[in-house]
Amino acid sequence: MNYSTNWIAFKTIIIKEYIRITRIWVQTLIPPIITMALYFVIFGRLVGSRIGEMGGFDYIQFIVPGLVMMSVITNSYNNVVSSFYSAKYQKNIEEILTAPVHPAIIVLGFTMGGVIRGLSVGFLVTITSLFFTPLPIHNGFVLVIVVFLTSFLFSLAGFYNALFARNFDEVTIIPTFVLTPLTYLGGVFYSITMLPEFWQFVSKINPILYMVNAFRYGFLGVSDINVVFALSLITCFSLAFFILNVRLMIRGYGIRN
């Protein structure tokens, strides 16, 4: 096993994922844009006009970073969990496993496919939001780092889900019953400073809160949490999921039964 072999395998997986995403772009890229546009209209224009300002900004400006992050999280996760589970279900994964490729390369390849889709959707949703409200950029460096790490983390989480999924129902359980509630309760539509002290403490247990607020800081310069701590947390979670996925791949969990 050498560097050249692993590099070719890594590029091949990424190209395969890219082709998969772009071939069915009507399913992978358009629906999130339509969904977020509806959020902008309903929560931003209709509801937001009654709420007024939040955090010193128009309500629609306040929620746009959270909605962009929500689309990045959802699409990064869904891309990897569906792609890798489909490879298992169709027995394509066996061809990859028999190749002289390190499991870490397989994990990284599928994960970067999720990152490509997550960042693509996030970019398109951001462009769409500009038709509804101007969006300043307070710190571009924080924006790029947060959105990439978040996409990377949830792509890894999707890979983990796909490893253990035994049927298509188990592919949708976590996004429906775990990911969606955590996202909606992660400060997308409100500042946790509005909550009683106890519920502020409970909210801070939700990791998505840190991602949304760090991303909001990149755009607007306001955050309910420490941005450096948020970046450290996302990085630690990403490393933990990456190491866990690689170890599971080496042991053959979910792919050799």
Image (cartoon, rainbow, N blue to C red):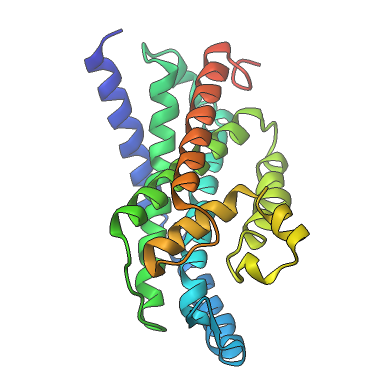
Of 242 and 191, the residue lying toward us = 191
- Image point (44%, 66%), residue name: 30
Q: Is residue 165 left or right of residue 78?
A: right
* In the image, residue 57 above or below residue 222: below
- The answer to whether residue 225 is seen in the rendering is yes
* In the image, residue 217 above or below residue 64: above
Q: Quadrant of the C terminus?
A: top right
Q: Position of residue 117 (x, y in %)?
A: 41, 51
Q: Is residue 131 left or right of residue 36?
A: left
Q: Is residue 127 left or right of residue 225?
A: left
Q: Position of residue 20 (x, y in %)?
A: 40, 46
Of 145 and 243, the residue lying toward us = 145
Q: Position of residue 85 (x, y in %)?
A: 57, 35
* In the image, residue 61 above or below residue 173: below
- Image point (50%, 33%), residue name: 236
- Image point (64%, 65%), residue name: 192
Of 137 and 80, the residue lying toward us = 137
